[in-house]
Amino acid sequence: MQTAGSLLKSSRIKAKLTLTGVSHLTRIPLKTLLALEKNQFNALPPTPYIQGFIQNYAKIVHLNPDLAIAAFKRDFTHRRQKKLIPDGLIKPLNPSVNRRYFVWLFVGLIILAYLFLTIYKIFSPPQLILDQPQSGEEVKSPFLIKGKTNRDVTLTLNDRTVNLQPDGSFITTGTTSELNFKATSRRNKTTTLVRYVIIVQ
């Protein structure tokens, strides 16, 4: 597909005219004619003047002015659109840059997730799980009590402190049918659990 500049130049050569000759006939500066042939529109005056130069040039070299103007409008519009689109959308970004970007993004997401979980654990109430006895279970007093909570909490059963293992698990005994557990974290977040059993003789 020929550009406006290539159409003008080929027509000039066909008409056996030099740029100097065209400049003399049209009174268009030689520098302007050269810019037209090279499609260097940014170096020329505003669009209406460029179209006037192209029209006069085309008439001198026996080229249909409408054809030259149409080619100019097509090329000029294409260049303006291309300038408005970021380079990364016109051509793919460097694959290695893309890989590094996604690696750092992935690492950043992992760090954010870790921080979120850490903060959540710090400010959320402690867990409290009672494995034994089950609610409504028939037991003989004294009976065994097993469960687990966070390792850094204070645990009480019926207002009596229960000793925890390093992993937060605990084993103790009970003698009453109502079991009131209370786990309190260092930030005074509490979790309570009440369980009832049936004591049989």
Image: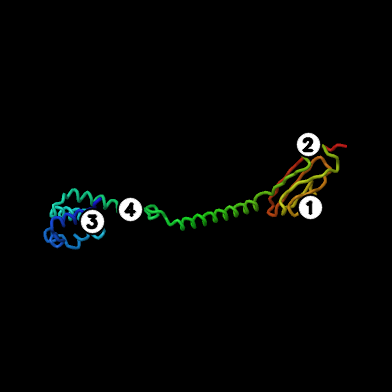
Q: Residue type at mark 4?
A: Lys
Which residue does the numbered mark 3 point to in the structure image?
46
Residue 65's label in the rendered image is: none
Label 3 secondary element = loop
Which residue does the numbered mark 4 point to in the structure image?
82
Q: Report if the CB atoms under discs 4 and 1 are less than 8 Å apart.
A: no
In three-dimensional space, the C-alpha distance between marks 1 and 2, rounded to whole angstroms, equals 25 Å
Which residue does the numbered mark 2 point to in the structure image?
136
In three-dimensional space, the C-alpha distance between marks 2 and 3, rounded to whole angstroms, equals 91 Å
Which residue does the numbered mark 1 point to in the structure image?
163
Point out residue 66 in the picture as x, y percentages from the top left corner.
Answer: 18, 48
**In the picture, residue 37 is in which quadrant?**
bottom left
The crowd level at tag 2 (other Cα within 10 Å; few <14, some 14-19, many 20+) is: few
The crowd level at tag 4 (other Cα within 10 Å; few <14, some 14-19, many 20+) is: few
Point out residue 7 in the picture as x, y percentages from the top left corner.
Answer: 20, 53
Q: Earlier in the sequence, mark 4 or mark 3?
A: 3
Q: Earlier in the sequence, mark 2 or mark 3?
A: 3
Q: Nearer the viewer, mark 4 or mark 1?
A: 4
In-front residue for pair 45/186: 45
In the displayed orientation, state which residue is furthest to the right.
Answer: 201
Quarter of the image for the C terminus: give it.
Answer: top right
In three-dimensional space, the C-alpha distance between marks 4 and 3, rounded to whole angstroms, equals 19 Å
Q: Please give left or right for residue 139 compared with residue 68 in the image.
A: right
Q: Residue at x 16, y 54 (%)?
A: 11
Q: Report if the CB atoms under discs 4 and 3 are less than 8 Å apart.
A: no
